[in-house]
Image (cartoon, helix red, strand yellow):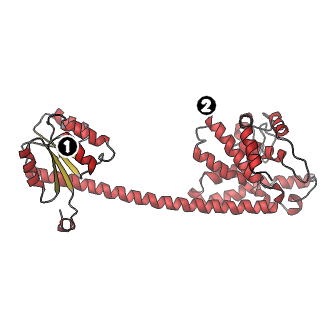
Amino acid sequence: MSSQEIAAGTLPTVLVVDDTPANLTLLAQVLKPDYRVQLAVSGLKALEICRRQPPDLVVLDVMMPGMDGYEVCRQLKADPATRRVPVIFLTALTRPEDEGNGFAAGGADFIHKPFNPATVRARVRTHIQLKQAEDLLLDHNAQLSGELDVRRREVERLRDTTLFVMVSLAEFRDADTGNHIQRTQEYVRTLARWIADQPGGPADLTDVAIDELAKAAPLHDIGKVAIPDGILLKPGKLSAEEWRVMKTHAEHGADLLQRAIDRLGEDAGLMLTFGKQIARHHHEKWDGSGYPDGLAGEAIPLAARLMAVADVYDALISERPYKHAMTHAQALDFIRDGSGTHFDPGVVAALEACVEQVQQIAARWAD
């Protein structure tokens, strides 16, 4: 042990456990020059000391009345507070199976009585140094983990801010949609949660995935920023050519989000991936008659299938300059009639099961 450590009062603590006072005295003399030594005459006393303040290492007799050393070691290893404290067995037992029992109980080393003081000092020093190195590594890993958490939060804040700006831009150009974005976001969250909770639900639809999916929902019409005002804001029915241009918003939105994914790389996360799926495919139809890719059935990403129901349902119950709003019952009938053709039957089932929650969301975010 260095003179600096001694001067600083940072000597490692070694707990010696033996039911023979003479052995305790001898071991204390052997170890005290380099360590702060604590003594215990029984296994129960040793556990009491360790639970109060874990030592850096335990030198432990095996054959003791009441609780033997193997049981003491097992209890130390079962307690998270003392699990990493190295235990050196010091015993008169010499059979190979005795050592095997010691290692099976969690011991780090085995010294036989009568012992050589130099051997005890060397073994204790080795295991103390190993534990100190392990502690340093764990502290370093914890520091790195903390730094990664900070970095991750910064990326999430940047991502969420970018999302807010993009969605705000889309809303600014199409002010008639009111609170459509907030409503559809919560519809998607509600429907996804119901599907995840069903027996045999998608294993990848975790709480984290659902949260990211809900965050991505507002991106469904982000591609409309590329649609000319004359088409986007036209109050009447679109011509065939205008409708062709309007439909390109799905591809524009996916391309825009792919650029963000490429720029962020590994930091892009699930939200932008879901956002791209939703932007490109929420106008696909279950029977393959939708756009832009004519996907059908489960080839359409689940995120987009959820958004398709949420988007159409909300559009039906909303007043627009070019149409009157439907009642919730009428909108539900429309969605139900499109089950298996326009919409995923599983998502329609989720809407029917969650209709009260959906109506509450619509009321909370009413225009």
Label 1 crowd bin: few (<14), some (14–19), many (20+), radius 10 Å: few
Q: Amino acid at mark 1?
A: Lys
Label 2 crowd bin: few (<14), some (14–19), many (20+), radius 10 Å: few
Indicate the secondary structure of the residue bearing disc 2.
loop
Q: Quadrant of residue 194?
A: top right
Q: Position of residue 170 (x, y in %)?
A: 77, 60
Q: Amino acid at mark 2?
A: Pro
Indicate the secondary structure of the residue bearing disc 1.
helix
Of the numbered discs 1 and 2, the one sitting upstream in the chain is: 1
Q: Position of residue 243 (x, y in %)?
A: 88, 52
Q: Residue at x 74, y 56 (%)?
A: 253
Q: Position of residue 76 (x, y in %)?
A: 27, 42
- Per the rendering, the mark at residue 97 is none
**Residue indicated by mark 2:** 199
Q: Position of residue 123 (x, y in %)?
A: 16, 51
Q: Residue at x 69, y 57 (%)?
A: 257
Is 137 situated above or below 206? below
Q: Residue at x 10, y 38 (%)?
A: 92
The reply to whether discs 1 and 2 touch (Cβ–Cβ < 8 Å) is no
Task: Tell me if residue 280 can be seen.
Answer: no
Task: Tell me if residue 152 can be seen.
Answer: yes
Of residues 105 and 64, the one drawn nearer to the viewer in this rendering: 64
**Residue indicated by mark 1:** 45
Q: Is residue 179 left or right of residue 198?
A: right
Q: Of discs 1 and 2, which sits in the foreground?
A: 1
Q: Residue at x 17, y 57 (%)?
A: 36
Is 184 situated above or below 36? above
Point out the image quarter for the N terminus: bottom left
